[in-house]
Image (cartoon, rainbow, N blue to C red):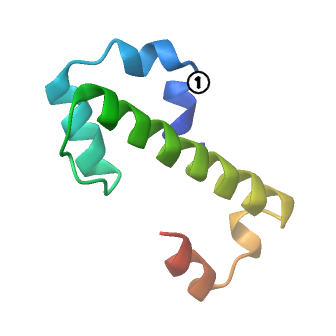
Amino acid sequence: FKFAKYFEDEITLDSLAMSQLRALCRLLGIQPIGSPEILRFQLKMKLRELQADDKLIVAEGGVEALSDTDVQQAC
């Protein structure tokens, strides 16, 4: 939940300026191309994916239970 916890409500993403949306996209490995609405949608999808990954990792015993290969694949 490292990044996702900062964006728990969609209002937070809705209030970001285009430059902030682009920077966040780059940070999360998303091509920062398109309108603000497209970037917000892509960010929302990525954050949901990260949340799902985090929940799965927790359910499987946490980061400590992952092998080095699993950690590399998760990153």
**Does residue 29 appear in this view?**
yes
Q: Picture coordinates of residue 46 (x, y %)?
A: 48, 48
Q: According to the image, label 1 marks what residue? A: 8
Name which residue lies at 76% across and 60% down.
56
* Residue 44 sits above or below residue 55 on the image: above
- For label 1, the crowd category at 10 Å Cα-Cα, with few meaning under 14, some 14 to 19 and many 20 or more, is few
**Which residue type carries mark 1?**
Glu
* Residue 14 sits above or below residue 19 on the image: above
* Residue 54 sits above or below residue 40 on the image: below
> Along the horizontal axis of the image, is 22 left or right of 68?
left
Viewer-nearest residue: 8 or 33: 33
Name which residue lies at 57% across and 51% down.
50
Viewer-nearest residue: 38 or 1: 38
Q: Picture coordinates of residue 70 (x, y %)?
A: 62, 81
Give the secondary structure at mark 1. Answer: loop
Quarter of the picture containing the N terminus is top right
- Residue 12 occupies which quadrant of the picture? top left
Q: Picture coordinates of residue 69 (x, y %)?
A: 58, 87
Viewer-nearest residue: 66 or 22: 22
* Residue 3 sits above or below residue 55 on the image: above
**Does residue 2 appear in this view?**
no
Name which residue lies at 51% across and 19% down.
10
> Along the horizontal axis of the image, is 32 left or right of 8?
left
Q: How many numbered marks appear? A: 1
Q: Picture coordinates of residue 2 (x, y %)?
A: 53, 43
> Along the horizontal axis of the image, is 30 left or right of 52?
left
